[in-house]
């Protein structure tokens, strides 16, 4: 039996901006077991980063709201944690590699020191020598020679800066690592190197991971489970196989996602992107949120009401076609 690490239930996240309520996350359920990698996939604005920020309690103080839902991490209720517990939780139990590495590092602090600061924060009992040793180990783990620890971020290439970010994120051996589009700012060959490195790290540290991406290639190369997100909802969830096996049933949005990417082993004359745009989250459509773009939309079933989730052997699809 695999052991449960994280369970998100019926999570809703709103941003209140003036008179507008941006409904970024609308009742999602997610589970991550120890050591497992979950891919959180969806186009821009789907609510992926918002989900991660809610989990780390890093939503903007005044505008970010969680009107409903629960987040359990190792049997602790994350939404009820006090400041002290949160400090230990962030970086210690769960850490996040942010979307843009270039702006997340401190430009005036040597990279080794930036890693050391995190180690010290979570391991007050460590001596200076222990901290230095951990910094060296972390740099080595991400493939940066430890001699370079006294350099500043601007002396590193984009790929190396991303490696430093990863070293910071894993410095305290978190049980869960959230990687938010960790490779999109990098060029293709460096992307492959960083992904390879993350895969190796994952098996060495045995940490669980949430990999946020819109790239199905990234999903295929590293994830065990996949959640497809659309307009703040999970529209399909399953194992990597459930999602990638074209002989199985899929949500029309998932099918659209696959039709809009080129496949190397198939001749495609023309890609078929999904028509239309994601709805404005401050003015979501009634019924199924995908219905305005859906080729299988049925007037009598899809325009009103809540769409139930249909499940078969753990593979879940939120669409009335599978009733
Ligand atoms: N601080 C904020 N204030 C108001 N609206 C926000 C804020 N942050 C995000 N949003 C809105 O919430 C929705 C979800 O955004 P989010 O950043 O979670 O999407 P995402 O799936 O991570 O997209 P991307 O792939 O572009 O990173 C979007 O409509 C976005 O404009
Ligand atoms: Mg994002």
Image: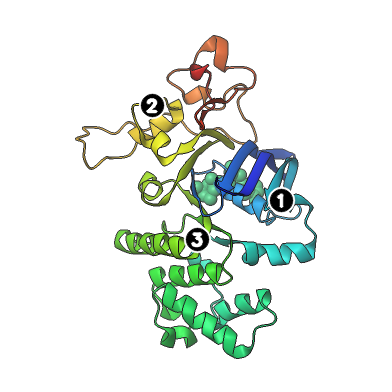
Whether residue 153 is visible: no
Crowding at mark 3 (Cα within 10 Å: few <14, some 14-19, many 20+): some
Question: Which residue appears at 60% of the width and 23% of the height?
Answer: 308
Q: Secondary structure at mark 3?
A: loop
Q: What residue is shown with label 2? A: 248
**Relative to 85, does residue 233 appear above or below in the rendering?**
above
Question: Is residue 226 shown left or right of residue 267?
Answer: right
Residue 84 pos. (x, y %) = 78, 66
Q: What residue is shown with label 3? A: 206
Query: Which of the two marks, 1 or 2, is nearer to us in this view?
Result: 1
Residue positioned most to the front: 1
Depth check: 281 or 172 in front?
Answer: 172
What's the distance in space between the residues labelled 1 and 2, CA to CA? 34 Å
Question: Is residue 260 shown left or right of residue 6?
Answer: left
Query: Earlier along the polypeptide chain: callout 1 or callout 3?
Result: 1
Q: How many numbered callouts? A: 3
**Relative to 225, does residue 178 appear above or below in the rendering?**
below
For residue 309, which quarter of the picture? Answer: top right
Depth check: 4 or 12 in front?
Answer: 4
State if disc 2 and disc 1 touch (CB < 8 Å). Answer: no
Q: What residue is shown with label 1? A: 75
Query: Earlier along the polypeptide chain: callout 3 or callout 2?
Result: 3
State if disc 2 and disc 3 touch (CB < 8 Å). Answer: no
Whether residue 134 is visible: yes
Residue 4 pos. (x, y %) = 61, 48
Query: Which of the two marks, 3 or 2, is nearer to us in this view?
Result: 3
């Amino acid at each position: 039996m695999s052991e449960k690490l994280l369970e998100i239930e019926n999570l809703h996240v709103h941003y209140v901006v003036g008179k507008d309520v941006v409904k970024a996350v609308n009742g999602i359920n997610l589970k991550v077991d120890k050591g497992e990698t979950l891919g959180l996939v969806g186009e821009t604005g789907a609510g992926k980063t918002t989900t991660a920020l809610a989990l780390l309690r890093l939503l903007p103080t005044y505008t970010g709201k969680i009107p409903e839902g629960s987040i359990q991490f190792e049997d602790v209720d994350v939404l009820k944690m006090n400041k002290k517990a949160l400090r230990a939780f962030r970086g210690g139990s769960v850490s996040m590699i942010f979307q843009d590495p270039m702006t997340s590092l401190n430009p005036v602090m040597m990279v080794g020191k930036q890693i050391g600061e995190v180690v010290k924060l979570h391991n007050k009992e460590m001596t200076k020598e222990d901290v230095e040793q951990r910094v060296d180990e972390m740099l080595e783990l991400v493939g940066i020679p430890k001699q370079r620890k006294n350099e500043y971020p601007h002396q590193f290439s984009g790929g190396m800066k991303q490696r430093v970010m990863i070293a910071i994120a894993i410095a305290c051996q978190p049980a869960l690592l959230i990687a938010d589009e960790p490779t999109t700012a990098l060029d293709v060959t460096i992307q492959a190197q960083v992904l390879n490195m993350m895969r190796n790290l994952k098996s060495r540290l045995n940490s669980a991971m949430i990999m946020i991406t819109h790239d199905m290639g990234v999903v295929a190369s590293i994830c065990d489970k996949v959640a497809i997100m659309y307009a703040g909802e999970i529209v399909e969830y399953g194992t990597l196989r459930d999602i990638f096996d074209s002989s199985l049933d899929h949500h029309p949005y998932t099918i659209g996602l696959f039709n809009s990417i080129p496949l190397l082993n198939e001749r495609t004359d023309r890609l078929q992107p999904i028509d239309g745009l994601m709805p404005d989250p401050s003015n979501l459509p009634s019924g199924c949120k995908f219905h305005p773009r859906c080729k299988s939309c049925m007037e009598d079933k899809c325009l009103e009401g809540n769409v139930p989730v249909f499940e078969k052997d753990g593979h879940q699809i939120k669409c009335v076609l599978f009733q």
